[in-house]
Image: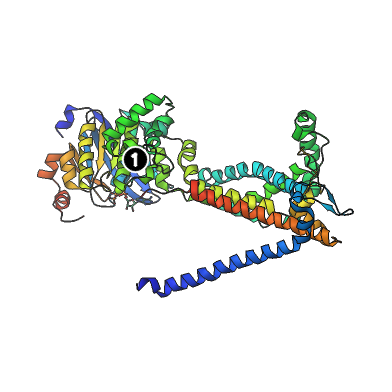
Amino acid sequence: MQEAKETSVKISVEGLNAWFNTNQVLKDISMDIAEKRITAIIGPSGCGKSTFVRCLNRMHEVVPKARVTGRVLLDGEDIYSADVDPVDIRRRVGMVFQKPNPFPTMSVYDNVAAGLRLMGVRDRARLDRVVKKSLEMSALWDEVKGELNKSGASLSGGQQQRLCIARALAVEPEVILMDEPCSALDPIATAKIEDLIAELKKDYTVIIVTHNMQQAARVSDYTAFFFLGELIEYEATRELFESPADKRTEDYITGRFG
Amino acid sequence: MRKRFSPDTMFEFAVGAVAFTGVILLAVLLLGELVLGAMPSIKTFGVGFLFETTWDPVFEKFGALAFIYGTLLSSFLAMLIGVPLSLGIAIYLAEVASSNVRTLISPVIELMAAIPSVIIGLWGIFVFAPFMRDYIATPLAKYLGFLPFFSGPAFGLSFLTAGFILAFMIIPIVSSITREALLAVPVLQKEGALALGATRWEMIVMTVLPYSRAAIFGAVIIGLGRAIGETMAVTMVIGNTPQLAASLLAPGYSMAAVIANEFTEATGDLYLSALIEIGLILFIISILVNASSRLLVWRYFEVRDSK
Ligand SMILES: Nc1ncnc2c1ncn2[C@@H]1O[C@H](COP(=O)(O)OP(=O)(O)OP(=O)(O)O)[C@@H](O)[C@H]1O
Ligand SMILES: [Mg+2]
């Protein structure tokens, strides 16, 4: 964690627990997430990775009967305190879902512009600019620039996922949560997204959930290993992969389970 | 090859063929019967039947326009009143109410669809029509009487009363189908909107309604079909006066109502035939409404999901 001290803490998670109904899926998670760095979350399927990132923008509570306790400080302020509007948090902490979910009745253009329009932006020139920039960042511009008016659902799965990334980028959040953004992508598109993520770190704090160990090793500065709802190990990425402290981490990254 | 002739496909094909030809046959037979019965009237009045308002059994002069007008106007009013209410109920139940409230209220609304229309008609005559006259029609005529559609004396039995009663009758079906459509919108779609910083209402406008628009449109058309074909309740509250009044507060008549009222007492052959021709027109209008809406759904409203 030495490198973490060079940069400030963007999100500080303190004693976070999360439930679906009576099923506790996150147990007393505490970790600091560094500003303008890339933090990877790894762990076997069902260990609570998605739930964890969804707790960082208050999306967990959208699920009926889901519950959260503990504190999540964004720039020092608890996003779960009573006077905070989750809508504001979600504008500051953007999210890309595990499965692509473009709005099928909207065009490619409108999908990307959706967040800005929610914020009341009507200026066409500004929308044009942001749409183009966001699509360029998500490496989709070249493929769709001639057909911005066609339906977002008519794109391929990988293109849809990049469209969703562009949609999240367009509102310029401070933090971007990416839940396995590359699971639907081919190697070329994956490489493009990984370049994008590296690029994003200049301006954004990025948290990426991934099943792909090489990807975590390639793109992230820090890596957290989750197992059965607990945070087992959280280190600078190189350290975690080269000299894992916990036996379970070692077993997982060497492919002995999961 | 083997797959094409598997028992399953054969069965599917056989059942499909039987059902399809059965339905088509029935429709064609019905249409043939109607055309045959309407022949004397068609021969006597020609196309003019559609544009003639006179309905005079004594002198055997018949025209359908007043009835077509009454059916279309009362149905239109029913949609104007019933569709927004149905949408509101559906949105409330699907997106706002807790699941407990939803499971409690939804069946009650659906039960409303089971009330026999003659009962609704009775309630219309004895409770709703006087209420309409005293508290809605009279003030409307008094304060908005300068508008043509609120002009003239205010009656309890009128186009507007029929519109309200019909609206009440379509709300259960339209709101239930819409509710189910809203509930079927994928969670991932809704979360996509929320994660962008949409409020619940913005989420509904942004993704829930557009995503389910085909089903909502279908629900509206089913409601319209019901309104156009509804007989008993309309007969009891529309006033049964064949006229082309611009005022919604005036009494009128509808196609289904005139058939129900006069069929048994239609004496002359031409009288009977004119009533059958009205039935034919009603049948054609219903089919046109359904077919064109089906086409619209296919062409413009169908939502292709991602993936
Ligand atoms: N909507 C839900 N309702 C009830 N339980 C849920 C729901 N979503 C997830 N769970 C449960 O919570 C636990 C953690 O799920 P989560 O989706 O966070 O895992 P994950 O680490 O993201 O897995 P994966 O790698 O497969 O995406 C799982 O045991 C799962 O069964
Ligand atoms: Mg997951």
Q: Is residue B100 visible?
A: no
Q: Residue at x 66, y 42 (%)?
A: B81
Image coordinates of residue A42 in percent, x first then y, are 22, 46
The residue lying toward the viewer, choosing from B298 and A191, is B298
Which residue, given by chain and number where applicable, does mark 1 sit on?
Answer: A55
Image coordinates of residue B236 in percent, x first then y, are 79, 51
Q: Residue at x 57, y 50 (%)?
A: B293
Q: Within 10 Å of the Cα at label 1, are there few (<14), some (14-19), or many (20+) other Cα atoms?
A: many
User: Hey, which residue is sitting farthest bottom in the picture?
Assistant: B7
Q: Is residue B175 above or below residue A35?
A: below
SS at mark 1?
Answer: helix
**Amino acid type, label 1:** Cys
- How did the renderer colour the structure? rainbow
The chain carrying label 1 is: A
Image coordinates of residue A136 in percent, x first then y, are 27, 33
User: Hey, which residue is sitting farthest right in the picture?
Assistant: B58
Image coordinates of residue B11 in percent, x first then y, are 46, 73
Q: Is residue A228 left or right of residue B189?
A: left
Q: Quadrant of the C terminus of chain A?
A: bottom left
The residue lying toward the viewer, choosing from B151 and A182, is B151
Q: Is residue B294 left or right of residue A64?
A: right
Looking at mark 1, is its residue's CB closer than 8 Å to ligand 1?
no
Quadrant in which residue A216 is drawn: top left
Q: Is residue B149 visible?
A: yes
Q: Quadrant of the N terminus of chain A?
A: top left
Q: Residue at x 76, y 59 (%)?
A: B276
